[in-house]
Image (tube, rainbow, N blue to C red):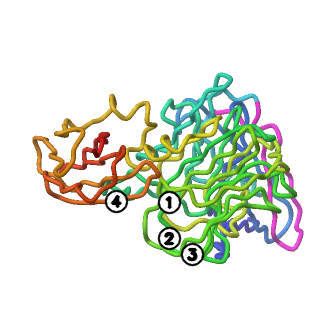
Amino acid sequence: MKKLVLFLLFGTQFLFAQNPFFGYLTSDQISTNSARVVIGASVSSGTSDFNIQYSSVSVANLSVAPSNTNVVTVSITNNYLYPIFSLTSLSANTTYYWRVRATTSTGFVYSNAYSFTTTAIAPSGNFPQIFNFNSSVKNIENSISFEIGPNDTYGDDRNGNPNSAIQLANGTQTLVPNIPVGNSARSFSIWIKPTSIGSDNHVFGYGMASGESAYGISFNASTVYNFAWNTNISASNSSLLNQWHHIVTTYDASQNAKMYIDGALVSNQNRPNWNTASNSYFYLGDRFGSDNNSFVGYLDDLKIYNYALSQADITSLYTNNTLSSQDFNQNNLKVSLYPNPANDVLNIETDLELKSIEIYNIQGQKVLSSTQKQINVSDLAAGIYMVKIQDAKNAIATKKFMKE
């Protein structure tokens, strides 16, 4: 029997065995009707045939499932091989189960079974696209899905809710239909908590990695960038490590690029030459599909808009995770404020004990915090403020009050 060895395609550790042996295999470039399967293999002598068995019925059905007609016959070339398979004519928004079949001199050897889900056909202009990463990599409409890897996990979000933020091992990608390209208006909102920071860490990116044809967010130990590849706008921030931060980037009809961190505007530059390429894939947590410059840590609440958000919207996203027009009819915590307007003391009325109260000005800056139901606001300047209230069960509400 010829010897076949599969190795970890995206790593440095090789897996060896005397008989045909399968290590890590990956599916990527998933769209509404196609996907790609890539494996890494080492053959000790002769040739081997590889093909893919796949089924939308069940794992058990793989024994009778169709095999990809693109059988790859490989010969020895430095012992290492990279068979690549394209699965086409798939159904949209469907989970497919698949495995690799290797032909040896004595018969067939099969890998473990894996799965992926094709994306749905989204209607034109279906925005915003929202991924809350609550134990899922699908958007809230269940029509678009990032690929989930065997080493990707979920952890606590910024409010301590378990399995409500994604931790990616090597980044992921998906197709976002009608994502803003060229110089069209857009906004991206995301929460990040890096647990390790290298020289260049990519939160997301799409378009083309050249010229002014990309769009994304990256950072290092001291600076956050909203980039178009060769040019960017930037802001200093040295407090990213092991802390949750909210980042929003906008690009408007006047070609003004803006970046907000934790609700506050930190950079505003005119970028008339930005021209994002329509290169289909949206990469999350890595540098355009490369393991280099990957994001290490937790990501949460990715939101994509096809227009430029206002300061009030961004303040509301930061304080309550919804747009300002939604804040006051989608609260999941019953709470009232009085008097409103207030001059000296603001009272918070709610049934449960409070975990925290935070008051933000209209620029998104936190100006007061407390755990008491009575707050002295006499030192605040006259104006409109937002109050973020969180109770002991992590229910959150945001209310507006006026300081006289």
Looking at numbered disc 3 in the image, what kind of residue is underneath it?
Ile
| Disc on res. 367 | 4
Q: Amino acid at mark 2?
A: Leu
Residues rendered magenta in the picture:
65-88
* Residue 297 lies in the magenta-colored region: no
Residue 197 coordinates in the image, percent (x, y):
57, 75
Q: Earlier in the sequence, mark 3 or mark 1?
A: 1
- Residue name at image x 44 percent, y 71 percent: 242
Labels 4 and 3: the sequence-earlier one: 3
- Marks 4 and 3 sit apart, C-alpha to C-alpha, by 29 Å
Residue, disc 2: 240
Residue 25 falls in which quadrant of the image?
bottom right
Q: Dot 2 lies on which element?
A: loop
Q: Is residue 67 magenta?
A: yes
Q: Are marks 2 and 1 in contact (CB under 8 Å)?
A: yes
Which residue is rendered at x = 73% and y = 66% of the image? 4
**Residue hosting label 3:** 197
